[in-house]
């Protein structure tokens, strides 16, 4: 009979079992990814990670520990995918090799799949000394991922209402974030968008370094809060905030008139922002000097994404030259102002999944001045959020008198058509046509768009994946998981 000091395994055996378990997890996950991609069952961006975690629950912790340069987590309601993409471009220009969930699978299984993809069949990550993890993470999944990868830095973009059936109100997400920040290692840097009062408040929970970023050029802002603003109240005393400038939603230069709580001065900021039909120009102030960049992305929200990526790069100690080269060489990600040429028409896909984000899309489209051709797709699948009542908080009235053709599709097409009717879109100018089947809707929208003009496709998440796949096949592009 064994006493309390006895062991059933020989010394070193537990280590060997751990290595064997990790190797088996990686091999099974890689095989799953290969089958999934070969038969076009998916991009191998989530299922392989799920398989790996089932075999080795510690696979994320074990593989991420091999990244000698550590990891960066990017989270927030809007802008995660684009910000992560811009940061990857900067990191590459700095001569490093990012490991990233670049297809946007941002739950634990997506992080696991990305790490497995970077590993060899033996479970070892090559060129580990130059590897940096860049992981975009679902708002509610942040605590789990942070605990597993022990990040060097965590970047918060913004906090808006999004999928209330999943996340609850913004205060619920803010509480989850505060708890996660308080649990970070003291060596971790927290990168905060101080134009968002809810994000700026996270500084009080951070033990380590905080890097703050914000927009100083207020020329593109507004005088008052949008209807979709989600943070009207002071996080310190609960009084209503006042704004000297509103950028969009509730982002801006804010101050509490009662207790004096105010937007902190940013360490990294955008001093000049200009946007046109095909891109934007930004001048960013980083520690040590200015960065000038021309982006293939339009709209104020993408200036924030570039600013966020630059702030994260500064937190990591990457040089201004890498930031400038990285931003200037960046390209649009799949579904995020991605452009294709189909049937003599330019097609631009502009993902929109909540009021604040869709309002920015509409402002970007209508800023061009010409009448727009639109295809709007609304789904209510789990990844979209079952509750579509958020469309009533979107300022579709911006489109009145500014559309040439409007086609509506998706699972909840008739809900969207009703919202557009109340916004004055159907009847005053272009008539809204409802076609629930996405492929037929896309064909109709293309035919309604004059040759040489642009069709703007505005889908929710699952609709974006479907319509993007159709457009990619027609345009001769690769699948979304193949796009860098």
Image (cartoon, rainbow, N blue to C red):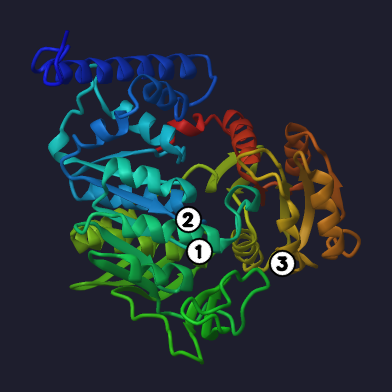
* Residue 44 numbered tag: none
- Sequence-first tag of 3 and 1: 1
- Horizontal side of 267 relative to 230 (left or right) equals left
Are the residues flagged by discs 1 and 2 in contact, CB closer than 8 Å? yes
- Horizontal side of 130 relative to 151 (left or right) equals left
Q: Residues within 10 Å of mark 2 (few under 14, many from 20)?
A: many
For label 1, the residue is 301
Q: Residue at x 77, y 68 (%)?
A: 397
Relative to 225, residue 15 above or below: above
Q: Residue at x 38, y 67 (%)?
A: 202
Residue 453 in percent (x, y) is at 67, 52
Spatial CA distance of label 2 from label 3 is 20 Å
For label 3, the residue is 395
Relative to 126, residue 391 above or below: below
Q: Residue at x 73, y 35 (%)?
A: 438
Q: Secondary structure at mark 2?
A: loop
Residue 429 or residue 223, whichever sits in front: 223
- Sequence-first tag of 1 and 2: 2
For label 2, the residue is 79
Q: Of discs 1 and 2, which sits in the foreground?
A: 2
Spatial CA distance of label 1 from label 2 is 8 Å
Q: Residue at x 30, y 14 (%)?
A: 24
Asked where in the image residue 385 lies, by quadrant, the reply is top right
Question: In this rendering, does residue 237 appear at all?
Answer: yes
- Sequence-first tag of 2 and 3: 2
Residue 70 in percent (x, y) is at 21, 45
């Amino acid at each position: 009979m064994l006493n309390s000091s006895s062991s059933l395994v020989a010394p070193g055996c537990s280590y060997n079992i751990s290595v064997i378990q990790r190797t088996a997890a990686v091999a099974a996950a890689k095989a799953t990814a290969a089958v999934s991609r070969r038969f076009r069952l998916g991009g191998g961006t989530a299922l392989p990670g799920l398989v790996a975690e089932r075999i080795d629950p510690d696979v994320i912790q074990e593989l991420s520990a091999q990244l000698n340069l550590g990891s960066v987590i990017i989270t927030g309601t809007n802008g995660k995918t684009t910000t992560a993409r811009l940061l990857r471009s900067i990191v590459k220009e700095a001569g490093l090799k990012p490991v990233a969930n670049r297809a946007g699978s941002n739950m634990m299984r997506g992080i696991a799949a990305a790490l497995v993809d970077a590993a060899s069949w033996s479970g070892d990550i090559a060129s580990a000394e130059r590897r940096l993890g860049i992981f975009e993470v679902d708002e509610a999944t942040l605590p789990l991922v942070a605990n597993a990868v022990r990040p060097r830095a965590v970047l918060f973009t913004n906090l808006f209402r999004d999928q209330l059936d999943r996340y609850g109100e913004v205060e619920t997400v803010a509480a989850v974030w505060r708890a996660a920040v308080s649990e970070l290692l003291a060596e971790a840097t927290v990168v905060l968008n101080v134009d968002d009062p809810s994000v700026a408040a996270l500084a009080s929970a951070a033990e380590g370094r905080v890097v703050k970023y914000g927009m100083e050029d207020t020329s593109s802002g507004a005088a008052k809060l949008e209807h979709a603003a989600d943070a009207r109240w002071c996080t310190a005393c609960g009084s209503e905030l006042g704004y000297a400038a509103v950028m969009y939603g509730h982002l801006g230069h804010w101050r509490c008139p009662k207790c004096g709580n105010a937007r902190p001065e940013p360490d990294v900021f955008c001093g000049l922002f200009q946007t046109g039909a095909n891109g934007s120009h930004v001048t960013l102030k980083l520690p040590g000097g200015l960065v000038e960049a021309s982006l293939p992305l339009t709209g104020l929200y993408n200036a924030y994404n570039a600013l966020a990526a630059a702030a994260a790069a500064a937190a990591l100690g990457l040089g201004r030259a890498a930031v400038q080269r990285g931003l200037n060489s960046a390209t649009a990600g799949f579904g995020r102002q991605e452009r294709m040429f189909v049937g003599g028409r330019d097609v631009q896909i502009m993902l929109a999944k909540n009021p604040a984000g869709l309002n920015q899309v509409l402002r970007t489209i209508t800023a061009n001045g010409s009448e727009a051709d639109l295809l709007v797709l609304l789904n209510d699948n789990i990844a979209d959020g079952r509750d579509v009542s958020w469309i009533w908080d979107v300022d579709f009235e911006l489109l009145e008198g500014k559309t040439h053709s409007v086609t509506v599709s998706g699972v909840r097409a008739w809900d969207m058509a009703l919202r557009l009717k109340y916004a004055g879109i159907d009847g005053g100018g272009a008539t809204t046509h409802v076609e629930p089947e996405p492929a037929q809707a896309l064909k109709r929208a293309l035919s309604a768009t004059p040759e040489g003009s642009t069709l703007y496709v505005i889908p929710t998440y699952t609709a974006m994946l479907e319509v993007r796949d159709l457009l990619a096949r027609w345009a001769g592009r690769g699948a979304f998981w193949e796009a860098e």
